[in-house]
Amino acid sequence: MEEYHSGDESWHPLILRLPLQCIEGIIGGMDYNQNKVNQWTASIVEHSLTTLVKQGKHFKYIVNCAIMQKSGAGLHTASSCYWDITTDGSCTVRWENRTMYCVVSVFAVAVSL
Amino acid sequence: MLELKCLFSCYLFACSIIRAPLICLALRPSSISTVSYIDEPGQHDDNQRHAVQMENTYQLGPVKRFPAMAVNNILKDVLTSYLQEEKYEAELCRQMTKTISEVIKARVKDLMIPRYKIIVLISIGQLSEQNMRFGSRCLWDAGSDTFSSYTFKNSSLFAVANVYAVYYE
């Protein structure tokens, strides 16, 4: 049986690509629409979560998504985590188009088996 | 369990350059995306260290559950005391997000809930004509894991604080 060490770098690129594809598929090419944004955040988050789960790794996931209309306002985000650095990690994806910003953060916490 | 100070802050502004991207792709003429990968401080020297093998605890669930209400009060407390009088300014808020996330993490750690991993996520933004939506979904054990969230607003800024607590079996 293959031994999997979560401290490996190899799982990071995998996690990096997934939310990006989800965002592009759901809101790529669209303009900010207040009526639909609720549905968009829900779809992006659910889609990212299901694709992450399909990787079959032993992690609990937390996916956070923020969609903001472009109006010149600023936004700052910070996170602080108390966990085991050999097994857990996080990643943030920032996406923008002409009318909106989308920031997706993924946190992966190992499950011991 | 080792502690990780994992801080990042991302600042979005209509005209400024997005800082420190590792990969930058232009997927279509109208959309730009960057992926920021957090470089964890311990990772380089600990590359050779394998994950520690733990012995079986024979515990079926958490002995002491995570007090979401108490954490809610902590969030309310911290956000109000730090941001009540503040006006939105880029530099100030950049520092403030990092400071507040550290303060909240320290106060939640002081509650001494055993075997829980803690994730604190703070967003501070400027109040203007824009609309915005935050969404979050978690894949975890609903019986033991939980979260707490608080939103603060004053005349020039808003702040959203999320604390996620994940039980380590």
Image (tube, coloured by chain):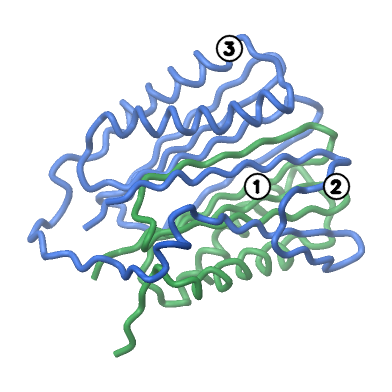
Q: Quadrant of residue A82?
A: top left
| Nearer to the camera, B43 or A62 | B43
Chain ID of residue with mark 3? B
| Residue indicated by mark 1 | A38
Mark 2 residue type: Thr
Looking at the image, residue B125 lies above or below residue A101: above
Residue at 50% x, 69% y is A52
Whether discs 3 and 1 lie on one chain: the answer is no
Which comes sooner in the sequence, label 2 or label 1?
1
Q: Residues within 10 Å of mark 3 (few under 14, many from 20)?
A: some
Are circles 3 and 1 on residues that touch, CB within 8 Å? Answer: no
Q: CA distance from mark 3 to mark 1?
A: 29 Å
| Nearer to the camera, B167 or B16 | B16
| Residue indicated by mark 3 | B84
Mark 3 residue type: Gln
| A6 sits to left or right of B44 | left
Residue at 56% x, 57% y is A91
Q: Secondary structure at mark 1?
A: helix
Q: Residues within 10 Å of mark 2 (few under 14, many from 20)?
A: some
Of the numbered discs in the image, which one, if any, rests on residue A99? 2
Identify by letter the chain in blue: B
Q: Secondary structure at mark 2?
A: loop
Rendering coords of residue B85 (x, y %): 62, 9
